[in-house]
Amino acid sequence: MTRDEIKNVILEIIEDIDEDADFDSLNPDEPLRDQLDLDSMDFLDIVMELRKRYKLQIPEEEYPELSTLNSCVNYLDPKLQDF
């Protein structure tokens, strides 16, 4: 899976969680929770969807790695190489 594909997967999952999410002004280096008004349950939904789709186990101590769009891509890139 390419980095762009990973980015698109993350945005797709977020859009499934929050249909009103506005990606037009999204800064990939700013925390997603601040920009998209995601709460902790929404964040867990993202983690659970990644687990469901790709059988990824993301330990809770690594959740900060998923704070921005770019950090999500950086974190997931090596884990999703075979998809």
Image (spheres, grey):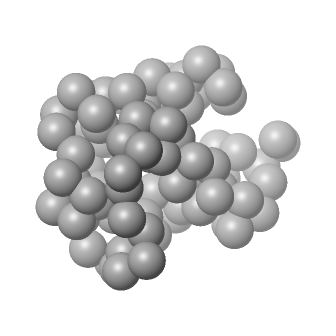
Q: Position of residue 79 (x, y in %)?
A: 64, 44
- Horizontal side of residue 39 vs 6, given as left or right: left
* Above or below: residue 75 compared with residue 39: below
Choose top left, top right, bottom left or bottom right for residue 21: bottom left
Residue sitting at 50 percent across and 37 percent down? Answer: 16
Image quarter hosting the N terminus: bottom right
- How many numbered circles does the render carry? 0
Image quarter hosting the C terminus: top right
* Above or below: residue 39 compared with residue 56: below
Foreground residue, 63 or 34? 34
Residue sitting at 77 percent across and 63 percent down? Answer: 2
| Residue furthest to the front | 20
Q: Position of residue 15 (x, y in %)?
A: 48, 46
* Above or below: residue 72 compared with residue 25: above
Can the viewer see residue 75?
no
Choose top left, top right, bottom left or bottom right for residue 44: top left
Residue sitting at 17 percent across and 34 percent down? Answer: 40
- Horizontal side of residue 62 vs 13, given as left or right: left
Q: Position of residue 33 (x, y in %)?
A: 21, 54
Can the viewer see residue 82?
yes
Q: Position of residue 27 (x, y in %)?
A: 35, 79
- Horizontal side of residue 66 vs 82, given as left or right: left
Residue sitting at 37 percent across and 27 percent down? Answer: 45
